[in-house]
């Protein structure tokens, strides 16, 4: 474990878990939506709700939704800046159950063109884990570039995707696919080493089974 995984990233305080990690979760949610959200419903679980006011958790999540990094000096002004940008953010208590990490949140975003929802946790030192996207389980840490594909579960799908990546010498670190049922909606998250050229994402998007692709870059501060 690196020292910065213990003490946290460069950030606007006071807490790596409640502030930096919260900001990163908001940032991931915005990236998944792919546009400026107009309305966001935020459910805070456990200590995120209990102690979030004192740690600036609401401000941090809002800052991430605006695309700010954890060390952005505008973090504390995020609620005002969000309203000025036409973004409405609602916060409420949410019980995700005893199995959930105490620093957990559910974010439901609506933009002009689409909606997205995620559940994630701030697990310490500013590190995060996204456990669910659009009600499908994932395991995204944000330490590697991650291709996220919304698609239909079809035979040979992964073979085709990895063949394209291999042709352009993109090394795959991990792959995880989650689906509702066989042959129905699915999400695949592919962690890769290095960048993914826009041309590759555009080529993959042409696959008939793919509804949408997001290339999630490494989280700010990593």
Image (cartoon, rainbow, N blue to C red):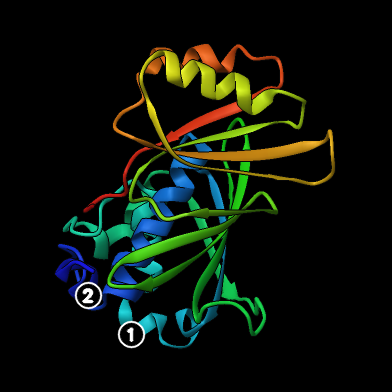
Residue at image coords 18%, 64% = 11
> Relative to 196, is 118 above or below?
below
Residue at image coords 62%, 23% = 159
Q: Quadrant of residue 45?
A: bottom right
Question: What's the mark number on residue 98?
Answer: none
Question: What's the mark number on residue 54?
Answer: 1
The answer for how far apart the CA atoms under marks 2 and 1 are is: 21 Å
Q: Quadrant of residue 116?
A: top right
Task: Report the residue marked by disc 2.
Answer: 6
Specify which label sits upstream in the sequence, 2 or 1.
2
Q: Nearer the viewer, residue 122 or 61?
A: 122
* Position of residue 138 measured from the top left corner of the image (x, y, whole percent): 58, 53
Which residue extends farthest bottom? Answer: 50
* Position of residue 111 measured from the top left corner of the image (x, y, whole percent): 56, 38
Q: Is residue 53 left or right of residue 154?
A: left
* Position of residue 211 measured from the top left corner of the image (x, y, whole percent): 66, 25
Q: How many marks?
A: 2
Q: Residues within 10 Å of mark 1 (few under 14, many from 20)?
A: few
Determine the secondary structure under disc 2. helix
> Relative to 200, is 11 above or below?
below
> Relative to 207, is 13 above or below?
below
Quarter holding the N terminus is bottom left
- Residue 86 in sight: no
Q: Residues within 10 Å of mark 2 (few under 14, many from 20)?
A: few
Are the residues flagged by discs 2 and 1 in contact, CB closer than 8 Å?
no
Determine the secondary structure under disc 1. helix
* Position of residue 154 measured from the top left corner of the image (x, y, whole percent): 77, 26
- Residue 127 in sight: yes
Residue at image coords 65%, 76% = 96
Closest to the camera, between mark 2 and mark 1, is 2
């Amino acid at each position: 474990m690196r020292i910065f995984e213990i003490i946290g990233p460069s950030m606007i305080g006071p807490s790596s878990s409640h502030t930096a990690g919260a900001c990163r979760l908001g940032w991931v949610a915005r990236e998944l939506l792919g546009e400026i959200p107009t309305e966001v419903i935020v459910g805070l679980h456990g200590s995120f709700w209990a102690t979030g006011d004192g740690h600036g958790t609401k401000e941090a999540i809002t800052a991430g939704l605006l695309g700010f990094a954890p060390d952005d000096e505008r973090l504390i002004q995020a609620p005002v800046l969000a309203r000025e940008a036409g973004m409405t953010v609602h916060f409420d208590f949410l019980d995700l159950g005893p199995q959930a990490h105490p620093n957990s949140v559910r974010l439901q975003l609506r933009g002009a063109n689409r909606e997205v929802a995620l559940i994630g946790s701030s697990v310490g030192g500013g590190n995060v884990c996204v456990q669910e996207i659009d009600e499908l389980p994932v395991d995204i840490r944000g330490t590697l570039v991650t291709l996220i594909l919304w698609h239909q579960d079809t035979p040979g799908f992964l073979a085709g995707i990895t063949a394209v990546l291999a042709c352009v010498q993109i090394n795959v670190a991990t792959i995880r696919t989650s689906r509702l049922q066989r042959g129905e909606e699915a999400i695949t998250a592919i962690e890769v080493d290095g960048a993914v050229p826009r041309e590759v994402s555009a080529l993959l998007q042409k696959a008939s089974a793919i509804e949408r692709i997001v290339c999630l870059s490494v989280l700010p501060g990593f």
